[in-house]
Amino acid sequence: MAASRQPGVEPVFGGAGIDAGETDGIEAEFRAPAPYVILQFRRKFSIAMHAEHLTLALPDEAATLALGAALAANLRPGLVLWLEGDLGAGKTTLVRGLLRAAGETGPVKSPTYTLVEVHVVSGLHFYHFDFYRFNQAEEYLDAGLDEYFSGNGICLVEWPDKAAPYLPAAAMRIELLVGSGADAAGRTARLTAVSEKGRTCLAGVRSSSLPPPA
Ligand SMILES: Nc1ncnc2c1ncn2[C@@H]1O[C@H](COP(=O)(O)OP(=O)(O)OP(=O)(O)O)[C@@H](O)[C@H]1O
Ligand SMILES: [Mg+2]
């Protein structure tokens, strides 16, 4: 039987699955007492079932702005979004689309030099970070930014990898990939819900009128 057809290795919801190591774990659990087995199996399986992804083609800037608007329609208090991708991938553009749709009429500037730009719109606080200029992750601690992540504000983080491992976890990760070949002008967005809050947001985005899946 091919590896991808083994129990527990089936892709779930378009790409998520339990890898071979975790399959070993499940087999080991079947040797444990029954109530424990059921609890652990259900816990592991539910994690795999809920690891949701959505991949979208963004052929032009307008599509990136539209994805931002779809996110704006599905915000939750305290939502943390990590925006990943190379220089110029479209992270700030996505934030601009989100903030415009949320009601921001003023400028949406890149926080590359200020570290954080604050927007207060529609009764919500938005904290837009850019950690590109960090030379080492400890600079996140020195900057004393943790408080922004502990309230009800929406945190939108460009270059989160520059502050890892100190940065609070994301509810959803959004990777923006610059196209290649015939699609060189566009971008691909890959959304991964990490927490329950992120899954709720992703479910809303999925049901928005967006470009077709890539
Ligand atoms: N889907 C898209 N297709 C083509 N161009 C796009 C798309 N989305 C955004 N762009 C363009 O990409 C350029 C760079 O965008 P942006 O400044 O948002 O990138 P960034 O990821 O924030 O970069 P940095 O890492 O420097 O902060 C802009 O000119 C923008 O119009
Ligand atoms: Mg940017």
Image (cartoon, rainbow, N blue to C red):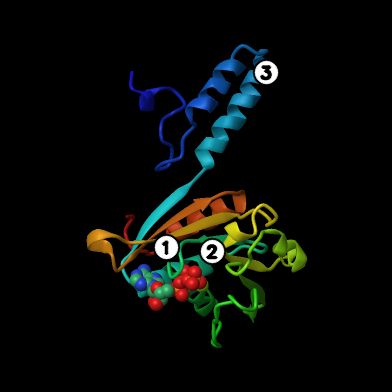
Q: Residue 101: x, y in percent?
A: 50, 77
Question: Is 6 or 202 nearer to us in this picture?
Answer: 6
Would you say 9 lies left or right of 116 here? left
Q: Residue 125: x, y in percent?
A: 67, 74
Q: Residues within 10 Å of mark 3 (few under 14, many from 20)?
A: few
Residue carrying label 2: 74
* Figure check: 33 above or below 111: above
Q: Residues within 10 Å of mark 2 (few under 14, many from 20)?
A: some
- Residue beneath the point at 53% across and 42% down: 50
Q: CA distance from mark 2 to mark 3?
A: 38 Å
The quarter holding residue 178 reads bottom left
Residue projecting furthest to the front? 135
Ligand 1 positioned in quadrant: bottom left
Residue carrying label 3: 35
Q: CA distance from mark 2 to mark 1?
A: 9 Å
Question: Is 174 or 154 nearer to us in this picture?
Answer: 174
Residue carrying label 1: 208
Q: Secondary structure at mark 1?
A: loop
Q: Earlier in the sequence, mark 2 or mark 3?
A: 3
- Residue beneath the point at 71% across and 64% down: 139
Q: Amino acid at mark 2?
A: Asn
Q: Amino acid at mark 1?
A: Ser
Determine contact: label 2, label 1, CB under 8 Å.
yes
Q: Is mark 2 within 8 Å of ligand 1?
A: no
Q: Residue 11: x, y in percent?
A: 41, 35
Q: Amino acid at mark 3?
A: Pro
Quadrant the N terminus occupies: top left
Q: Residue 26: x, y in percent?
A: 56, 21
